[in-house]
Image (cartoon, coloured by chain):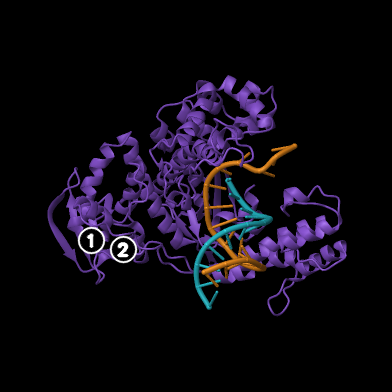
Chain colours: A purple, B cyan, C orange
Amino acid sequence: MTRWALEATDDGGARLVGLSADGRPEGPVLREPDLAAAVRSRPEVTRWVWRSTFGIYPRLLAAGVRVERCYDIEDAESLLLAHEGRLGEPRSAAAALARLRHAPVPPDPPQRAAEPGSQSSLFEPGPVPVSLEDLLQVYGEQLKRHEAAAHPGRMRLLTAAESAGMLIACEMNRSGLPWSADVHREVLTELLGERYAGGGEPRRLAELADEVSAAFGRRVRPDLPADVVKAFAQAGIRVKSTRRWEIESIDHPAVKPLIEYKKLYRIWVAHGWSWLQDWVREGRFRPEYLPGGTVTGRWVTNGGGALQIPKVIRRAVVADPGWKLVVADADQMEPRVLAAISRDPGLMEVAGRPGDLYQAVSDKAFSGDREMAKLAVLGAVYGQTSGDGLKNLALLRRRFPRAVAYVDDAARAGEEGRLVRTWLGRTCPPAAGSGEAEEAGIPQDAPEPAAEGEEGWVPGYASTNTRARGRFTRNFVVQGSAADWTLLVMAALRRSMSTAGLAAELVFFQHDEVIVHCPEAEAPTVVEAIRSAAQEANRIAFGETPVRFPFSTAVVSCYADAK
DNA sequence: AGTCCTCACCGG
DNA sequence: AACTCCGGTGAGGACT
């Protein structure tokens, strides 16, 4: 393993130095005039240590230089701070350095929102410059902090994996997802009808709005929930909201066109012609991926809604001529992850059988009722607390006691305000008094309300917010450990495709699903690479267990044909 | 005019 | 049968 530290200078050059095994500089800091050339001329370097992947790697990619591995100091700082339970401390390299020197800690620079078509990074370099020498102080300290983690080996794996994720995200941000604007427009016209001049609703939406109004006997705007609720009330039907699941069972002539309107309206506003205009250039949709953008470690995208592409719009994702899309998604990832992290013997055995996992669970505990088994498993993971879920959960607990105890423990830890960690050590911050955690989407304890006041409050039981936090941490250990695992899969897949010298590129990633764009001849190799990456990630993350992580793969020209 | 909130949909 | 977990998105409207 050859490691070098790298800093981009303002004039397009680089300062860089080789590192010893313990992360200390070996020899003098070199100065080179060209950043990309400095990296390209050192193919023996297997890991580049730098302040921020998003701050430097896009420049290398633009010059045609890819790197094998990296270590992202600011990302590692985030993960380490969370692991140490230090919620809300600034994560920048400058802040880390200031803490090291007991100096005033600068706040993080604000995040900039993505603009359509922009190639810029989410995190601009901070306002406080940090020299390469200072950066290496922070790096050395971070290496020590890994050793103080609950499981040092897993923590090292976590920061390495997420650094790999940063490389992959930059590469995907650059390559983009193959997108046929012509097919997209065909789909839109088919669904929505022609657009009227002036940018108003397309024909089909206008017709549906008229049908809704006719059914109510007065002018109703279907895109205004308050208007719809009022219209139903005047028709003698009380509804609390206009959500589809609430109104679809109502016997009223307005319901059918209303539901159709909502579905199409959504496509029009979120993935219509203006989306196409904003986000698709030269046959590629380029969202900005951000690894670890959520508390659980799932990625988010910034702009373009790449993780919410409606199924009907997937017809627009079309491979280049002579190329294919390899679409792969992990089968029942979350219960398999629960088996691996809880080490429940029964669930591991079930997750090691070939074939459908929910069927296997149902054969073992639910007399062959697959739907019931699936609901029970998902209920355990999501914290379902009512209805048939509870009854099914009892059955699940009898057959798979360790698995259910694992998520129950996570829920209790969350309710008690303790730190909760994924398998690799990504940490859910404890409940805190400030509003900071709540802004990050983590349910927080609130002051206990008066006993008489709150509906459903029972003396001696946890408050609504505490229970919400329990559900959150219950889900966190499974969803977050699954995110750990997929990160390792992505890293292994990227490396094996690169080692094999393929032209194949990762072009899409969505929680448990990945798309590789490759020349047709490479497709079988890519399919096999995905299979072995899943195996490798399984072994590295969880060690030797009977649990299997199969992927369903499809080699297609169009994403919509994958399922 | 700009900011924040609610609603309801999309995806996993 | 109910709408539990994690997010992004845009429109409309209330507010400053």
At horizontal 50% and vertical 55% (from top left) the residue drawn is A519
| Picture coordinates of residue A49, whole percent (x, y) | 26, 52
Give the quadrant of the N terminus of chain A: top left
Residue A53 image-quadrant placement: bottom left
Q: Is residue A289 left or right of residue A20?
A: right
**Residue A130 circle label:** 1
Tell me whether circle 2 and circle 1 mark residues in contact (CB < 8 Å).
Answer: yes
Task: Give the answer, above or below, for where A203 lies relative to A138.
Answer: below
CA gap between label 2 and label 1 equals 9 Å
Q: Chain of mark 1?
A: A
Q: Is residue A217 left or right of residue A559?
A: right
Task: Give the answer, above or below, for where C10 lies relative to A199.
Answer: above
- Residue toward you, A199 or A218: A218
| Picture coordinates of residue A469, whole percent (x, y) | 51, 40
Q: Name the residue tied to disc 2.
A: A126
Disc 2 secondary structure class: loop
Q: What residue type is disc 1 on? A: Val
Q: Is residue A363 left or right of residue A50?
A: right
Instruction: Please count the marks in the image.
Output: 2
Q: What residue type is disc 2 on? A: Gly
Label 1: few (<14), some (14–19) or many (≥20) C-alpha neighbours in 10 Å: some
At horizontal 60% and vertical 24% (from top left) the residue drawn is A396
